[in-house]
Image (cartoon, helix red, strand yellow):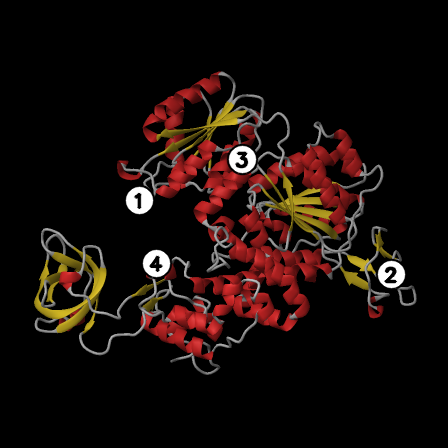
Amino acid sequence: MPSPAATADKPLSAPQKALRKLGLVRPIDLALHLPLRYEDETRIVRLSDARDGDTVQIEGEVTHQEVTFRPRRQLLVSLNDGTDTVVLRFFNFYPSQQKQMAVGTRIRARGELRGGFAGLTMMHPTVRAAGGALPQALTPVYPTVAQLPQPYLRKAVLAGLAQADLSETVPPEVLSEIGHLRLWDLRKSLSFLHQPTPDVSLAQLEDHSHPIWQRLKAEELLAQQLSQLEARRAREHLRAPVLRAERGGVHEQLLAVLPFQLTGAQRRVGEEIARDLGRVQPMHRLLQGDVGSGKTVVAALAACIAIDAGWQCALMAPTEILAEQHFAKLVDWLAPLLQARGQRVAWLTGSQKKKARGEMLAAIASGEAALVVGTHAVIQEQVKFQKLGLAIIDEQHRFGVAQRLALRQKLTDAGGALLLPPAGEGRGEGKASLASGQPLTPALSPEGRGRQMATEPHLLMMSATPIPRTLAMSYYADLDVSTLDELPPGRTPVVTKLLAEHRRGEVIERIRGQIAEGRQVYWVCPLIEESEALDLRNATETHAELSEALPGQMIGLLHSRMPVAEKKAVMALFTSGAMPVLVSTTVIEVGVDVPNASLMVIEHAERFGLSQLHQLRGRVGRGAAASACVLLYSAPDGGRLGETARARLKAMAETSDGFEIARRDLEIRGPGEFLGARQSGAALLRFADLAEDSTLLQWARGAAPRMLDQHAEMARRHVDRWLGTKSDYLKA
C-alpha cells in the first residue's frame, strides 16, 4: 500500500494528494477516519425473499442486455437468480461495463430493490463477477473526495490502523469513572468500527448510538478539553498591561455624559471586564448579548479604562458598515473627552484614500489615536501601534480562522513592553512598573528581572449570537464568558408574522401605511442577482417592484457589490430619515441602528439561518413605535416547506429570546455549522454530539485538569493523537 506521506525524491500520486486534502497524513489520522455507512456484502439474498425497498446483494445469470434511447440513453440488464428476474438500469455506463455484464455471464449485484408494473429493478447497482468467498465483515464506505476511490481508501485505512500507535493515553482510574468505557480498548474499538461483524445493528453503527462509540466520543471530548485547558493555562503565564481607570479620567467622564442609565447587566459585565483588565494575565473574554442589549457601550467603557491607563485600544468589526456604526457612536461619546487630552478616535478600513490612511497610520504609531476602529485593515502589516493594551473584536466568528490566527499574532506583536525590576529588588511584588506607571505584581524568575518583557494585549470578543451553554462548555472552554441578559428600557417588542409569498400585495399595503405614519421599512432579499438553481427574486427586481408600487417615494438599494461610497450614501439617506424604504441583502444584518425603522420584511425567509433571521429582526423595535417583522416564505414548486425551514420559521414566530433562538439553532444545525468559520469548515467534534453526549462532556471537563496535573505526557500524546495541528483552530 503506498504511503500517504511524501518522500523527498518521489512526487505524490493523485490518491496521495487526495488523502492529504482530507487531512489523512499520519497513520493515526487514517485509523481515526471512520466510515459514514456500511454495505452488507457478507450474504447473498434470493429475489423471492427480498422486499421492495431492501438494499440487497443478489447473484445470478445475465439473460438479456440492451441499450435503449427512450426516454433517454440507458443500459438495461436482466439478471435471473433462479427465483426471479431483476432489471439493472444504468444511465451512465461504459463499454467495459457492457462487457462485464454480457449475456450468459454470472455476476453479483448490490443495490436498492424497487418493485413496479414492469417488475423488479435496481438503479445503478454495484456489480462484480460472481464466485469467490463472501466477506466476513461489513464493507465500510468512507467520506472521500475526487481522485480517491473507496478500494484505495479502504487499503490505506487498514494500513494506517496497523501502523498507528494506539497505546492507552487515558489512565485506567480516569476511564473507570465511566465504567462501560473500559470494556473496549482503542485498538479493539477502531478495528471493530472499520470491519464490523454482520450481526451488529447497522442503524446503531451509523447513528453513533452503538456502545462502542461511547469510548471514541469520550476520548475526542477529552482531547478538546485538554487542548483548551492547556491554552488557558498557557495564557496565565503570559503578561499583559495592568489597566485601571484613573480618577476623573475618560471612564468616569463617559459614565457622567451618557444620555441613558446603564442596565444592571451592563454594570455587572463592566465590572467583570474591569477586574480582568486590572490583572497581569491577558483577558480572554467573550461578551455575548442579544440584539440590542447594549454591548457597544460596555466595549466603550472598557476602551476608556485602557486609555486612562495610557494604552491604546483597537476595535475591529467584520464589515465596513458595522465598523462605521461603531465608529459613529464612539466618536459621538468619546471624541470631546479625548480631544481635551490631545487624542482622537481613528478610522481605518481598506477602502480609505491613501492620504487619509497615511494620516491615520501616523496617528496610531504616535499614540495620538487612543482608540482605533475599523475592519480587518486594523491588523495589516503597515499598522504599527505605539502600545496596544486592549483589542475588541465584534462578531469575531465571522472572520475566517486564518484571519483570527493572524490577529492573535498581530496583537502579540503590537503590545507594549513591561519594565521588569532589576536584580536585587526582591521578586517584583509592587516594584515593577508599566510605561503607564501602573503597578505590576507577577512572580518573576531571577533571570527575568532588569529587562523589558513583551506584553500581549487584553482581548474582548463580542457576539450578538448567544452561545448555548453546552457549546460554551465545549468550544469556548478556554474563554471567560460575560452575558448581557437584560435589554435596556424602551426596546419595543417586535411582533413576528409568517406570510406566504402569494400575500405579497398585503405586505406592500402595510408598507404604504408605515410610510404615511412617518416610519421606515427594511426589505431584505437573499440574493443580488438571479440564480437558476434557487430561482429567487433578487434585490434589484424587488427594488424596481417597490419603486413602481410606491410612486413618489425614495426606495433605496443596498448590496455587497456596490462601491463603498455608494453604500455609505444610501445608508446616510436611510439613517437620516430621508429614505423611507431600504431594499437590501444581508449587509444590514448586524449593527445598523435606525430607531425610526418599524417594519422588517424578509423575503424567502425559508432560505435564511435562524440566527441570521433573529439578527435581521433586531434591526427594528429600536424606537418607541410598535414594530413588526414579516417573514415571507415560498415552498418549492408549490409543495411543502422542508422540515428544517419549518423548524426555523416556527422558532422565530414562537420566541424573541436570543438565548432560546440559539438553543434551537444548535438543535437544528449542530455545533459545527452553528459556529461557522471558527472550525475552518470542518467541525473539530467529528463523533461526539453536544446535545446527546452532555454526560461525557462533563466527564471530560472534570478529567482534563487531573490529566494535565498528574499525567502530563499522556495528556500531550492524547491531544496530538486526536487533534494534531487542528488544536490551533480551537484557539482562533
Identify the element where label 3 is drawn: loop
Identify the element where label 4 is drawn: helix
According to the image, label 3 marks what residue?
657
Q: Which mark is residue 532?
A: 1
Q: Position of residue 725 (x, y in %)?
A: 55, 66
Q: Nearer the viewer, mark 3 or mark 4?
A: 4
Point 55% across, 24% down: residue: 596
Q: Is residue 206 left or right of residue 174?
A: left
Cα separation between marks 4 and 1: 37 Å
According to the image, label 2 marks what residue?
428
Q: Position of residue 667 (x, y in %)?
A: 46, 46
Q: Name which residue type carries label 1.
A: Glu
The residue nearer to you, when weighing 283 against 558, is 283
Mark closest to the chain's N terminus, 4 or 2? 4
Cα separation between marks 1 and 3: 36 Å
According to the image, label 4 marks what residue?
203
Q: Nearer the viewer, mark 1 or mark 3?
A: 3
Mark closest to the chain's N terminus, 4 or 1? 4
In the picture, which quadrant includes the C terminus? bottom right
Q: Position of residue 3 (x, y in %)?
A: 42, 79
Q: Position of residue 381 (x, y in %)?
A: 64, 57
Residue 608 in view: yes
Single out the residue that lies furthest toward the front.
Answer: 179
